[in-house]
Image (cartoon, rainbow, N blue to C red):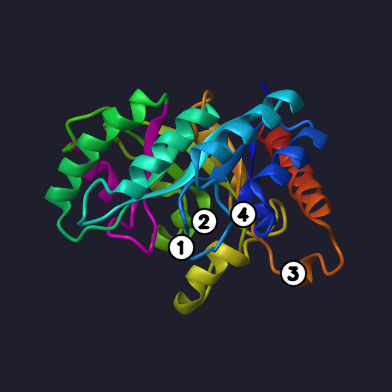
């Protein structure tokens, strides 16, 4: 099976049902969708089990798997009703993994929350993978490795190449020993540097298509475990596709990502 999964942010205003249709047309075996409200992206999300049932049936008919879900924020309130609903949605969709971000200043408490969250997710068939980024409480790969080493549950890391470059200046830390494996990755491109006050906008709205930026994507892909699936997560400014449909946007991004994987010899 192809390693790439089409992320909903590629066509940020598309409904989940349309993303499944687009993936089928592109012969992309899986998609990554939102199952929680995202205040930063505002992307449409699968908000109920009822909608999830209908979407799963549609995806099955089209031969598309719903591999991954975004984004489960663990804050000081612990495991909220919204998070529990998201897990039910994910189980109904047949998702295999989900992204977790840490939003609690008390990292010891956050470790306990994550340890309690993991078995709940596993009961619904999903593995939680934790992401570091500049907008949460854990901002670097090394910090995340240390944090997860203190969690009494099986976890893994979600590695977004953008956050390596913005938070660490590159992918060098991927070679550092870490007791917790990388279980999932996210692919895009970008300039080596960008003004700090533009990072959130870039992450949600203005990433570059693979091959059109300066990131060492070959090195990033070759550093990943070979069994890791890779989200193609490339939200782009409307000016990049001024008259393009959601399909045309996704087709351009997926074609570029496939070329990069072939160049890296990891397709």
Which residues are the magenta region?
A: 126-149
Q: Nearer the viewer, residue 144 or 59?
A: 59
Q: Which residue is mark 3?
A: 238
Badge 1 local density, few (<14 within 10 Å), some, or many (20+)? many
Badge 4 local density, few (<14 within 10 Å), some, or many (20+)? many
Q: Are marks 1 and 2 in contact (CB under 8 Å)?
A: yes
Q: Which residue is mark 1?
A: 166
Numbered disc in front, either 1 or 4: 4
Q: Which residue is mark 2?
A: 162
Q: Cα distance, mark 1 to mark 2?
A: 6 Å
Q: Left of 79 or right of it: where is 132?
A: right
Q: Cα distance, mark 1 to mark 4?
A: 19 Å
Q: Nearer the viewer, residue 131 or 109?
A: 109
Q: Nearer the viewer, residue 118 or 204?
A: 118
The N terminus, quarter of image: top right
Q: Residue 78: horizontal and vertical position, in percent? A: 22, 49
Task: Assign a secondary structure to mark 1.
Answer: helix
Q: Are marks 3 and 1 in contact (CB under 8 Å)?
A: no
Q: Which residue is mark 4?
A: 9
């Amino acid at each position: 099976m192809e390693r790439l999964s089409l992320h909903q942010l590629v066509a940020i205003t598309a409904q989940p049902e349309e993303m499944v249709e687009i993936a089928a047309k592109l012969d992309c075996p899986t998609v990554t969708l939102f199952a929680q409200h995202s205040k930063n992206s505002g992307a449409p999300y699968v908000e109920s089990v009822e909608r999830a049932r209908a979407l799963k049936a549609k995806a099955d008919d089209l031969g598309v798997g719903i591999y991954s879900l975004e984004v489960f924020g663990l804050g000081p309130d612990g495991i909220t009703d919204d998070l529990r609903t998201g897990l039910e949605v994910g189980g109904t969709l047949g998702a295999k993994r989900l992204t977790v971000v840490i939003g609690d200043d008390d990292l010891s408490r956050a470790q306990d929350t994550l340890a309690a969250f993991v078995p709940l997710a596993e009961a619904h068939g999903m593995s939680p993978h934790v992401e570091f980024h500049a907008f949460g409480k854990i901002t670097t790969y090394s910090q995340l490795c240390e944090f997860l080493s203190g969690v009494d549950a099986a976890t893994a890391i979600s590695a977004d190449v953008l956050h390596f470059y913005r938070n660490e200046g590159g992918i060098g830390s991927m070679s550092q020993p870490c007791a917790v494996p990388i279980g999932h990755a996210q692919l895009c491109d970008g300039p080596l540097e960008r003004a700090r006050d533009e990072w959130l906008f870039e992450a949600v709205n203005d990433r570059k298509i693979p091959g059109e930026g300066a990131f060492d994507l070959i090195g990033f892909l070759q550093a990943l475990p070979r069994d890791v699936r890779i989200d193609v997560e490339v939200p782009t400014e409307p000016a990049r596709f001024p008259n393009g449909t959601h399909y045309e946007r996704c087709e351009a991004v997926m074609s570029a990502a496939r070329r990069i994987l072939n160049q890296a010899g990891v397709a």
